[in-house]
Image: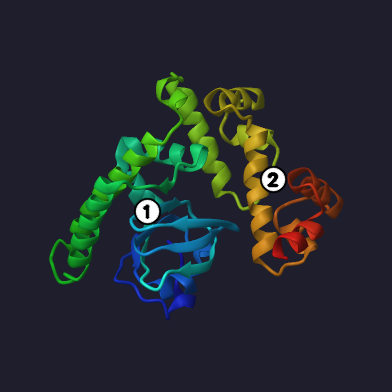
């Protein structure tokens, strides 16, 4: 998990080496989530709230939630006067252990189809109100012998209910289409490799070599599983990083170019014009204005 030594003023209702909870809106606004390398669940338990997720405005109503991948940037928080929200930070290993064989479905919803905005109906809201109540109660029982195990058990139930709702929101064609299990495993490994890289702008050949397959086969698998090629996935993830650094840091264009692994400013400028329709300087200025 992330090193929170530089955020000692942040308080948690619960914290161990794999799971942390931030349970006040003020603390959430102070937290630098870009350093967090676990999955994040941002839940609005009361009122309404808005937050920028990697520069994109998202709105949550009572008992709605966002499931977010590691190193997601949360900024510009706003809430109604009665807002109450919780942020759970759970290590990738723990989520995979709790979900077991269904971890691949979790990542598919999160990374491929992005059905990670949990919209609730009346029955769902009643269910999550119960979860909030019992979790709040159990979090206070610090001295219980099996406190950690109880918290993980509650989280496992919550994760599966979130996964149920994310899977229900998948495109219908995905629920009926049949794809080779080996292809899905390969694509899942490719996406994990891509998301873990700081410098994502690399040749498809580089990723294929690390996955021990040919570039043509990796491209074929990506297209059959998702409809997009491996190169398109690399560009999409790279664009997200470029957008984040241009809009959420004060680094110079040259510093961003070097940090994200582009060979020179000219190449970086061409990439931005293709992705955003303008130069990196123009894009930064327009979006900030």
Q: Measuring 36% from the left and 76% from the top, which residue is drawn there?
A: 11
Nearer to us of marks 2 and 1 is: 1
Which quarter of the rendered picture does the N terminus lie within? Answer: bottom left
Image position of 204 (left or right of 92) = right
Q: Please tell me whether residue 75 is drawn above or below residue 53 in the rendered image.
A: below
Image position of 38 (left or right of 76) = left
Q: Measuring 84% from the left and 54% from the top, which residue is drawn there?
A: 265
For residue 247, which numbered disc appears in the image? Answer: none
Image position of 22 (left or right of 220) = left
Which quarter of the rendered picture does the C terminus lie within? Answer: bottom right
Q: Where is residue 104, by image quadrant?
A: top left
Circle 1 residues within 10 Å: few <14, some 14–19, many ≥20? many
Q: Earlier in the sequence, mark 2 or mark 1?
A: 1
Residue that label 1 marks: 64
Image position of 130 (left or right of 37) = left
Q: Which residue is most to the left? A: 145
Circle 2 residues within 10 Å: few <14, some 14–19, many ≥20? some
Q: Which residue is most to the bottom? A: 9
The one of 26 and 125 positioned closer to us in this rendering? 125
Q: Measuring 20% from the left and 62% from the top, which residue is drawn there?
A: 133
Whole-number angstrom distance, CA of label 2 to CA of label 1:
34 Å
- Residues at circles 2 and 1 in contact by the CB criterion of under 8 Å: no
The x, y position of residue 124, in whole percent, is: 27, 47
Q: Measuring 72% from the left and 67% from the top, which residue is drawn there?
A: 251
Check disc 1 and report its element: helix, strand or loop. strand
Residue that label 2 marks: 201
Q: Is residue 54 visible?
A: no
The x, y position of residue 109, in whole percent, is: 44, 39
The x, y position of residue 78, in whole percent, is: 49, 69
Q: Please tell me whether residue 189 is drawn above or below residue 38 in the rendered image.
A: above
Q: Please tell me whether residue 112 is drawn above or below residue 240 in the rendered image.
A: above
């Amino acid at each position: 998990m992330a090193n929170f030594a530089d955020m000692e003023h942040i308080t948690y209702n619960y914290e161990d080496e794999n799971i942390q909870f931030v349970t006040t809106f003020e603390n959430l606004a102070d937290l630098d989530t870009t350093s967090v390398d676990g999955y994040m669940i941002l839940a609005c338990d009361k009122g309404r709230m808005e937050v920028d997720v990697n520069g994109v405005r998202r709105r949550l109503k009572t008992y709605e939630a966002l499931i977010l991948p590691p190193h997601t940037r949360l900024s510009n928080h706003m809430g109604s006067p009665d807002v109450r929200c919780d942020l759970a930070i759970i290590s990738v290993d723990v989520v995979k252990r709790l979900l077991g064989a269904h971890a691949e479905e979790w990542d598919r919803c999160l990374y491929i189809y992005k059905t990670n905005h949990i919209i609730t109906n009346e029955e769902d809201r009643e269910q999550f109100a119960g979860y909030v109540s019992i979790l709040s109660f159990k979090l206070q029982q610090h001295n219980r012998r099996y406190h950690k195990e109880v918290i993980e058990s509650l989280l496992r139930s919550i994760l599966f209910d979130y996964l149920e709702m994310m899977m229900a929101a998948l495109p219908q064609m995905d629920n009926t289409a049949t794809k080779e299990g080996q292809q899905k495993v390969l694509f899942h490994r490719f996406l994990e490799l891509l998301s873990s890289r700081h410098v994502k702008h690399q040749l498809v050949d580089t990723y294929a070599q690390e996955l021990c397959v040919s570039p043509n086969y990796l491209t074929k698998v990506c297209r059959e599983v998702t409809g997009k090629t491996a190169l398109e996935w690399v560009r999409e993830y790279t664009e997200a990083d470029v957008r984040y650094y241009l809009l959420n840091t004060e680094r110079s264009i040259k510093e961003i170019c070097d940090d994200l692994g582009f060979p020179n400013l000219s190449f970086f400028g061409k990439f931005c014009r293709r992705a955003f329709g303008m130069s990196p300087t123009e894009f930064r200025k327009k979006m900030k204005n």
